[in-house]
Amino acid sequence: MNDKSMFPSRPNKASSAEQELVGELVRDWQYLFGQRGNWQNHWTEIAQRILPQDSWLFQNYSQLNSQGDKRNFELFDSTGLVALQRFAAILDSLLTPSDQYWHHLRASDEGLMKNREVTMWFDKANEILWKQRYAPTANFQAQNARIFMSLGAYGTGLMFIDDLAGNPGLRYKNSHLSECYIQENHQGVVDGVCRHFMLTARQAYDQFGDKCPENITSIINSFPERQFYFLHWVKPRKDRDPDRKDFKGMEFASYYISIEGMALVEEGGYRSFPYAVPRYFQATNETYGRSPAMDVLPAIKTLNEQKKNMLKQGHRVLDPVLLAHDDGVLDAFDLTPGALNFGGVSKDGRPLVHPLPTGNVQAGKEIMDDERALINDTFLVSLFQILTESPEMTATEVMERVREKGILLAPTIGRQNSEYLGPMIHRELDLLSKQGLLPPMPPLLKSAKGEYKIVYDSPIVRTQKSEWAAGAMRTIEQLMTVAQNTQNPALLDYINWDMAAPQMAAIYGTPNSWINTKEDIDKIRQQRSQQMQQQQQIQALPAAAGFMKAMPQKGGQGPAQ
């Protein structure tokens, strides 16, 4: 296919209103396509150096069929590529670790959480959501990793969340940035996505049936693998009728358009926006995000050039260029191991052949190490090597380092909660509710219209809260020192241990199953109190016996004097 095939051909037969709608949507996409030329060049340059398998995706569309070609011509040093993979793993472990609950659901009205039915409903809903998200058929973990890779490389990711086809459940798909175009509303929230993609004639007919244009249906038998371009628009529905129960009453419209024949092949809708679109950092007046790779692209390019020079230099060191006097000795000079070269030295043993000086290889290595350190810093790699490289640190020093991490990562992580995880959870709950997989709401919550909030409990959130734990540790250490020096344990009464202990356990990530419930704690304290009373009674028995002996007996004269 050539470049022209991505643009509209003659229109298919349809109503004038439908043709007008298709024309409007195609023009909107063409405008977005033309507006991001600078981004395309930027993303291509990044992909060539840290994600070579993606480098062709952002180039012109005549190369879309060049499958299996070599794409790592610009890659000489793998530091950026490895740092990107570690960056994705770091974000995954900090934000969405699969081995622990990294969020909880609560009622927006905290007063409702005092009701046991409401509390149990949110716990159950959270459990169901977790089970569906991490089900093997959902494919969340693989697609989530690709989102974090896209954030590190390009600064923008797109996660599509939908029903599991044919069965109850969820399905996740990372839509590659190269084929997606985004729109923001007046508040800077992404509420429109246009995806430009290809299907073979057979795939198109399987999905859209007879609604495919004649140009496609006519070749299904003869050329079933020929590829055609399509658009999928998701945007707020302008003509929404809230009273309707079909897609016309849904908040977001869905349009599938065949570029071949300019035909609307499917129209539908979504009750909630099906995309979660995180951006790593967003510059003023820009829709797409900027990435760590963009920040260190000069360092990555410099390191690549340095690596090329170092390879040349290394070859010269291992296989040096030889310098010799023009006396004909090199005419038969043999460099094979064990060879004899007569005439290579003078009669007094002075070498007549010398290697060409190659410069200071160690200095080049140090310069490259500086660039590598900058790249690893930007991709957060060095930040998480501190603890493993300094195992001799005390508990207080560890807490201080963890606190520093939380401070450095707070802006980045906060944006992912608001643009990625929050919209994704909202979409998931909407789908599960529609499928009837959530338990019936208790009356009290239903009267509050089911309003909820998300409480994040990921490792990075606990890291950000480590300032509290670090402050508590410093305070307790100081109080204990003063209490020991002054022999005044009353100073420790300033600490509310019933509040501090469970919150510190939560900050450190202690499993809930290891923590006693309030009922268990009350029982332990009651038993301890009884044991102390019994001990006091036992200790008081000798004194009580002596006192009884000293007491005057009834009708007697009392103890002898």
Image (cartoon, rainbow, N blue to C red):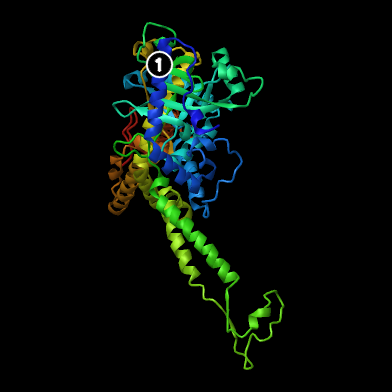
Asked whether the viewer can see residue 544, the reply is: no
Q: Single out the residue that lies furthest toward the bottom.
A: 348
Between 422 and 346, the residue placed more toward the observer is 346
Asked whether the viewer can see residue 64, the reply is: yes
Q: Quadrant of the N terminus?
A: top right
Q: Residue at x 38, y 30 (%)?
A: 32
Vertical relation: 344 (above or below) 235: below
Q: Residue at x 62, y 21 (%)?
A: 202
Neighbour tally class for label 1: few under 14, some 14-19, many 20 plus, Cα within 10 Å? some
Q: Single out the residue that lies furthest toward the top.
A: 243
Give the x, y percent position of residue 353.
59, 82
Between 219 and 410, the residue placed more toward the observer is 219
Is 351 placed left or right of 20 in the picture?
right
Vertical relation: 373 (above or below) 190: below
Give the x, y percent position of residue 534.
43, 34
Residue 548, image quadrant: top left
Between 348 and 279, the residue placed more toward the observer is 348
Give the x, y percent position of residue 302.
44, 57
Give the x, y percent position of residue 422.
39, 28
Is 48 placed left or right of 456 in the picture?
right
Vertical relation: 444 (above or below) 71: above
> Mark 1: which secondary structure?
helix
Is 460 placed left or right of 338 in the picture?
left
Q: Quadrant of the C terminus?
A: top left
Tally of marks: 1
According to the picture, the residue beneath numbered tag 1 turns out to be: 21
Residue type at mark 1: give it.
Answer: Leu
Between 552 and 32, the residue placed more toward the observer is 32
